[in-house]
């Protein structure tokens, strides 16, 4: 098939000079040759179409659909989203609800299977993928990092100068599907702290373990500072995302610390969220209004390249967005 322009050139314009003038005045549009050509899309996985689709891609000719399905079933949900952008066939394949049902039941395992099915039918039109994108959840494939800065007065060496210092410190939180989380306050950057954010960390690392609950988009986390005078740390935050399904921001609504009496001491492995209510009369609570910068989520794959690793000289203030 040739373009309309090639058919409309008259025979008297065959000389080289005249053809050169025509090419200069008329814009070539080679995509006009594609008009009227029907490109048949690739049938999705499990399609009832009787026609045999011959995929020209080498990976699809060498890798059967069954093995491709097994590879996808072992990938993380956010990796599935990236794989869906590769080609049309992968996008259709990843719309299979089996992948998203497994991800949803694992993310909200504390709600129970029956409760998750009720929420699925009442709010998300029985779509596991829609539930994964729209329902707030805590991400467990990285760290939530809060970067806080404040100005501190320095030592006066001369009567003329009054030096000040810009101090930067971080709050780190790592959540687990089991309902536990790790917390650490440090002046070190993300790439240095991620190595010790695990349950095998020693006491010298300053990593504390606690429990959390998720109600709609509200996250309530609590842990105990050990010592002669135990202190209860409690924070209430709100989950949000910069894009649909991201859940990569956490705004701190309240942060408080409380002294616990010796007769009301809680064991570290107990659920302090449930036992903190009856101790309310025995606790003197102190609310904190500083150091409440929003938490930004940093995946483990981006720990080394995150902008949160920049020193104060290059980034004095960080806006999570």
Image: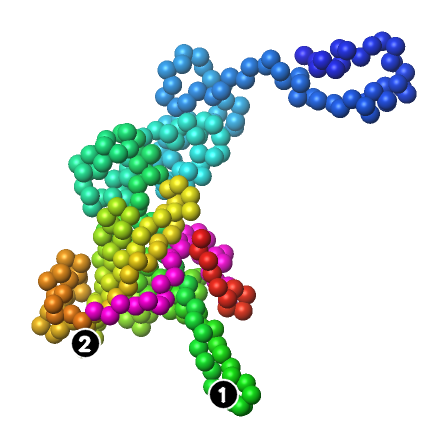
Instruction: Determine which quarter of the picture holds residue 220.
Output: bottom left
Residue at the far left in the pictured view: 263
Q: Which mark is residue 229?
A: 2
Q: How far from the left and from the top, in percent, is residue 288?
A: 30, 68
Disc 1 marks which residue? 156
Give the residue at x 44% y 30%. 90
Q: CA distance from mark 1 to mark 2?
A: 36 Å
Q: Residues within 10 Å of mark 2 (few under 14, many from 20)?
A: few
Magenta span covers which residues? 285-311
Residue 40 part of the magenta-drawn span: no
Instruction: Determine which quarter of the picture holds residue 201.
Output: bottom left
Give the residue at x 13% y 73%. 261
The quarter in which the N terminus is drawn is top right
Say which label, 1 or 2, has the lower sequence index.
1
Report whether residue 202 is seen.
no
Give the residue at x 26% y 67%. 287
Residue 290 part of the magenta-drawn span: yes
Give the residue at x 44% y 20%. 43
In the drawing, does residue 34 fall left or right of residue 101? Answer: right
Front one among 107 and 76:
107
In the drawing, does residue 291 fall left or right of residue 5? Answer: left
Report whether residue 55 is seen.
yes
């Amino acid at each position: 098939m040739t373009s309309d322009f090639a058919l409309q050139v008259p025979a008297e314009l065959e000389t080289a000079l005249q053809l050169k003038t025509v090419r200069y005045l008329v814009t070539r549009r080679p995509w006009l040759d594609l008009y009227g050509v029907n490109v048949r899309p690739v049938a999705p996985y499990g399609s009832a179409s009787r026609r045999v689709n011959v995929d020209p891609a080498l990976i699809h000719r060498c890798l059967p659909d069954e093995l491709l399905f097994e590879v996808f079933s072992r990938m993380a949900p956010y990796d599935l989203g990236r794989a869906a952008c590769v080609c049309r066939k992968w996008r259709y394949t990843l719309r299979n609800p089996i992948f998203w049902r497994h991800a949803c039941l694992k993310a909200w395992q504390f709600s129970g299977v029956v409760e998750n099915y009720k929420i699925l039918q009442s709010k998300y039109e029985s779509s596991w993928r829609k539930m994964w994108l729209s329902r707030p959840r805590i991400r467990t494939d990285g760290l939530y990092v809060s970067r806080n800065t404040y100005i501190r007065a320095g030592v006066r060496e001369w009567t003329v100068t009054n030096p000040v210092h810009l101090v930067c410190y971080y709050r780190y939180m790592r959540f687990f599907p089991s309902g536990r989380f790790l917390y650490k306050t440090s002046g070190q950057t993300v790439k240095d702290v991620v190595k010790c954010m695990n349950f095998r960390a020693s006491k010298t690392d300053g990593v504390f373990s606690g429990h959390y609950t998720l109600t709609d988009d509200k996250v309530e986390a609590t842990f105990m500072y050990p010592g002669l005078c135990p202190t209860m740390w409690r924070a209430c935050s709100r989950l949000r995302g910069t894009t649909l399904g991201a859940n990569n921001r956490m705004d701190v609504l309240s942060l408080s610390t409380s002294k616990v009496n010796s007769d009301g001491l809680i064991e570290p492995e107990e659920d302090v969220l449930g036992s903190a209510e009856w101790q309310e009369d025995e606790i003197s609570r102190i609310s904190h209004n500083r150091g409440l910068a929003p938490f930004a989520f940093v995946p483990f794959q981006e720990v080394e390249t995150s902008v949160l690793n920049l020193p104060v000289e290059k980034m004095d203030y960080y806006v999570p967005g």
